[in-house]
Amino acid sequence: MGVNGAVGEEGIRRRGCSCTKDDFLPEESFKSWGNYVQALKETPSRFMDRVLTRSLDSTELHEIKGRSQHEMKKNLSWWDLIWFGIGAVIGAGIFVLTGLQAKEVAGPAVVLSYVISGVSAMLSVFCYTEFAVEIPVAGGSFAYLRVELGDFMAFIAAGNILLEYVIGGAAVARSWTSYFATLCNHQPEDFRIIVHSMPADYGHLDPIAVVVVSVICVLAVLSTKGSSRFNYIASVIHVIVILFIIIAGFTKADPKNYSDFTPFGVRGIFKSSAVLFFAYVGFDAVSTMAEETKNPARDIPIGLVGSMVITTTAYCLLAVALCLMQPFSQIDKDAPFSVAFEAVGWSWAKYIVAAGALKGMTTVLLVSAVGQARYLTHIARTHMMPPWLAQVHPKTGTPINATIVMLTATAIIAFFTDLGILADLLSISTLFIFMLVALALLVRRYYVSGETTMADRNKLIACIALILGSSIASALYWGISDDNDWITYVITVPIWFFATMAIQIFVPHARNPKLWGVPLVPWLPSASIAINIFLLGSIDGASFIRFGIWTCVLLLYYFFFGLHASYDTAKESGENKVADGWKKVEEGVTSSEAKSGLQVTNSS
């Protein structure tokens, strides 16, 4: 980039040192009402530009990252990432939702629900790992989707990523109160303020959850390495408690409790697995720490895959231990493990369980706080959100503004909203994002602009459409059909299979991973797409309505603010690409280069 480009880039970097209008809406479209009205008139053309424009790996790694003024400190190893992964995942899901799902949805077969959710999560882990190694930036899946699926899809995913973190943090914070009450020999409602004039799902106010989130905010703001040390110590204690629960639970096991293994049938197992996916949420936060990892090519695969294997194994053993200690019909929904130990005569053990659960949920909140702030930071670097949120503090090396904003939203939601609503809505957002990341991996491996022929591109589009269509049809049919009716799957599953096989046989690889790659492509990402979509079919309709409302809010923000801010920023920095057909959609020339090329052509 020439001198002007350097000046423009430096101008972008200088923004956000204070707290003025230019820190929130510095773009040309918002300089005056006249500019804004003109920008709104250009919405269709700008939208097409953002839909067809895809970022580059190098853009995300250098130019976009440079907009935070200061670098994040590279001080994390694979050991830190494994413990961050364990700390991020093992929390409220296993200690709270297991009881509810075992008692009312799946019975002792809840262990199979954890296996299904774990397989889906592991497939997603592989997809995340390749991207995190190739594009080690704080944006996580937002950055990956921006590179492969374009700005608009990345923004829709970004909104759901932020929703996932806020809701997940709020759910864990409310669960923290429940186990704290158990530790104090009280009921959770004893520590909540009940407002009878409000709806039941929103009228149980939780001040303790707000205090816990505030303390976590301070820890996350101070230091990533300090957060890592705290997480490491807390996670070690947490693992010891989990081992105690498993060993003690098996010593008090009664095989008769497994006599009715699937009381709710296969549908109960899959319905439960969709909700229990909540228990695996958090590992994607580890991918956002790639920018602070010393050796991403080595550390990220070990950290992500290692922590997920440990977590899945622990979940299955905990679920088996719980259902062997007590008949599923007698399991307590709020504090299942504590009550189970009371039922077998070990009342003292409930305090160990409660303490372990509190430590686990504290580390989940901490890792979530670290991850969500980095997501928001990278989104703000593209100006889809105000660039004020992209600031990294020069002393702590942490994104203070993003951390405070995200955790404030988490505290507000945690104060009002019931756990049941949060868990279902969280699962929808998470499954949707993981499906998009798997789709992006297929695009990354089989499509490179300027190299992939039009015929191969069309084959890839057709195959992906068949994979998505067959997966959606299976999920819809599962949601509305009878338990014993399988005829549709005889059609949809072979379509998925042959569409995936067609990619392998007829579409040539366009790009191979440089450092670490997902094995069994296209089968593994295609399976991830199918399983994630299928699990969505097991979630209740009310949650989809809430998801639809949130998506509408995102679209309103995007068309009135985010679209114009990101368009202006891309234009100013030379990031815009010419969207002349498909060949220049991704790794095409910049606007300035295109103009130069046209001038040369005209002169000749």
Image (cartoon, rainbow, N blue to C red):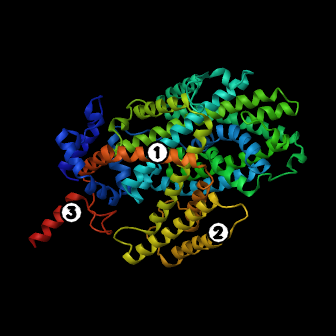
Which label's residue is closer to the chain start, 1 or 2?
A: 2
Secondary structure under badge 1? helix
Q: Is residue 227 left or right of residue 68?
A: right
Dot 1 amino acid type: Ile
Query: Can see residue 300?
Result: yes
Q: Is residue 337 left or right of residue 374?
A: right
Q: Which residue is mark 3?
A: 594
Q: Which residue is mark 2?
A: 489
Query: Can see residue 88?
Result: no
Crowd class of label 1 (few under 14; some 14 to 19; many from 20; radius 10 Å): few
Residue 99: name its quadrant.
top right
Residue 306: x and y in percent read: 63, 50
Look at 72% across and 21% down and name the residue there: 184
Crowd class of label 3 (few under 14; some 14 to 19; many from 20; radius 10 Å): some
Q: Are marks 2 and 3 in contact (CB under 8 Å)?
A: no
- Marks 1/2: CA–CA distance: 31 Å
- Marks 1/3: CA–CA distance: 40 Å
- Marks 2/3: CA–CA distance: 49 Å
Look at 41% across and 52% down and name the residue there: 154
Residue 540: x and y in percent read: 61, 49
Q: Which residue is mark 1?
A: 549
Which label's residue is closer to the chain start, 2 or 3?
A: 2
